[in-house]
Amino acid sequence: MDINQIRERLPHRFPFLLVDRIIEYNPGVSVVGIKNVTINDNFFPGHFPERPIMPGVLMIEAMSQVGGAVILEPDVKGTSGEVFFLAGVDKVRFRKPVIPGDTLVMRMTLMKMHKRFGVAKLEGKTYVGSELVCEGEFLMATGSDPQARFLYP
């Protein structure tokens, strides 16, 4: 998926859309997305001016957005008007700092999906090259958003 297809699926917009491309997509199973980290990202001037490091919470957010691409599957169920919410994170570990010039490769694998309750559990691993930089388990919830019709032009 290119950025236009991602924007059709996810409600996030600048400056909070943290996925540049989906490079692998297995419906209902897993998804791999990338984020190109650049010095132009709006968080670097404050984190940190002398040693820019991507905030861990934004890595978690980027991973959850990639996970949302596998949860909000229009080819599996009609999801227009639905959004997803990060409901919890467990076992998150940051293994190495992420700096400008890095490319995050985020693999999110669906572990459990309870469609009746709109809850999913995913396992996520993020790499820069072959090095694991972040991993964790994500609990996500889908829900109807009465404003969603305004999010999808």
Image: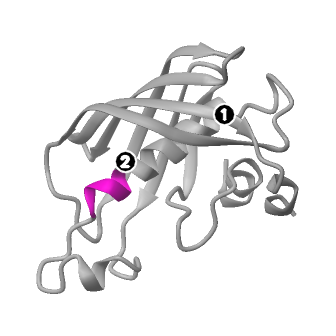
Instruction: Please give left or right for residue 79 compared with residue 116 in the image.
Output: right
Residue 37 x %, y %: 36, 66
For the point 39% across and 82% down, the residue is 40
Inspect the magenta stretch and tell me whether residue 44 lies in it: no
Q: Amino acid at mark 1?
A: Thr
Instruction: Please give left or right for residue 18 compared with residue 12 in the image.
Output: left
Q: Which residues are magenta?
A: 55-59
For the point 71% across and 57% down, the residue is 7
Secondary element type, mark 1: strand
Secondary element type, mark 2: helix
Given residues 37 and 82, the one toward you in this image is 82
Which residue is denoted by mark 2 in the rendering? 60
Residue 90 x %, y %: 30, 30
Which residue is denoted by mark 1 in the rendering? 142
Residue 97 x %, y %: 16, 57
Which SS does the magenta portion mostly show? helix
Image quarter of residue 113: top right
Mark toward the viewer: 1 or 2: 1
Instruction: Please give left or right for residue 115 compared with residue 101 in the image.
Output: right
